[in-house]
Amino acid sequence: MVYELLAAAGVLALLTMVPGPDMAVVTRRAVAAGWRDGLRTVAGITTGLLVWGVLSVAGLAAVLAASATAYTVVKLAGAAYLVLLGVQSLLAARRSRQHDGTAATADLPPPSGHPWRTGLVSNVLNPKIAVFYTGLLPTLAPHGLSPHTGMSLLVLVHAVLTVVWLGGYVLLLARARAFFARATVRRAMERITGVVLIGFGVKVATAQA
């Protein structure tokens, strides 16, 4: 059972490290508002994973994964939210450019909304997690444990890996704070993350179940 758990943790670690909407949301928060907001965003994302985990263990996520209508509604809501975050990022960069074209450090306003809530909403409105938790996760559950226990354990492992990976990423960005404090760099990062978030929004909207 130990080897099965380690193998499952390895698969979850690889999936966690693949860049996606969560990393884009965290990047924008950490660069624009500092590492504290970045970590709060990570906490919101992790809470979203735990929400999906509870729903999966209860069997409700399977209903969403099996219902084309429910899946589409959540998918489009999540895509719209990512696009909204991306547009806000691009507008923030534009306002900074108009108000401060020569300063050495950027004066970008912090992103709107509480960072924890931003991370939570972006994660809860990602129906791919429901598909992942109800499709792949049960196949990784160690033998010898009840289905509910195995699923619960893997959800907790996934949550811990997410905190470690994204939290470490936020702290790495904080180490380069002086670099990201430059006006041109901050504006460039806002533009890049804005485009990336919009791109992920489009990808989510057009993805098939």
Image (cartoon, helix red, strand yellow):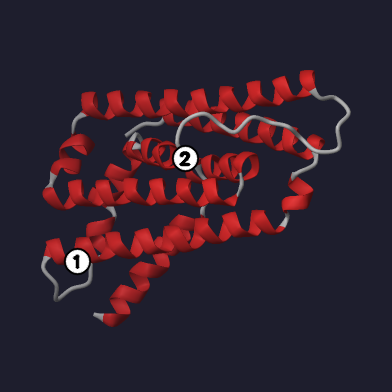
Disc 2 and disc 1 in contact, CB within 8 angstroms = no
Please determine whether, in this image, residue 82 is positioned above or below residue 130: above
The N terminus lies in quadrant: bottom left
Most foreground residue, 163 or 104: 104
- Vertical placement of residue 163 versus 33, above or below: below
Residue 19 showing in the rendered view: no
Identify the element where label 1 is drawn: helix
Residue farthest along the bottom direction in this orientation: 2
The residue to which callout 1 is attached is 150
Q: Which residue is mark 2?
A: 115
Quadrant in the rendering for residue 116: top left
Relative height, residue 65 to residue 56 (above, below) = above
* 53 sits left or right of 35 in the view: left
Can residue 16 be seen here? The reply is yes
Q: Mark 2, residues whose alpha carbon is within 10 Å: few (<14), some, or many (≥20)?
A: many
Residue 158 horizontal side relative to residue 150, left or right: right
Q: What residue do we see at 57% from left, 22% from top?
A: 87
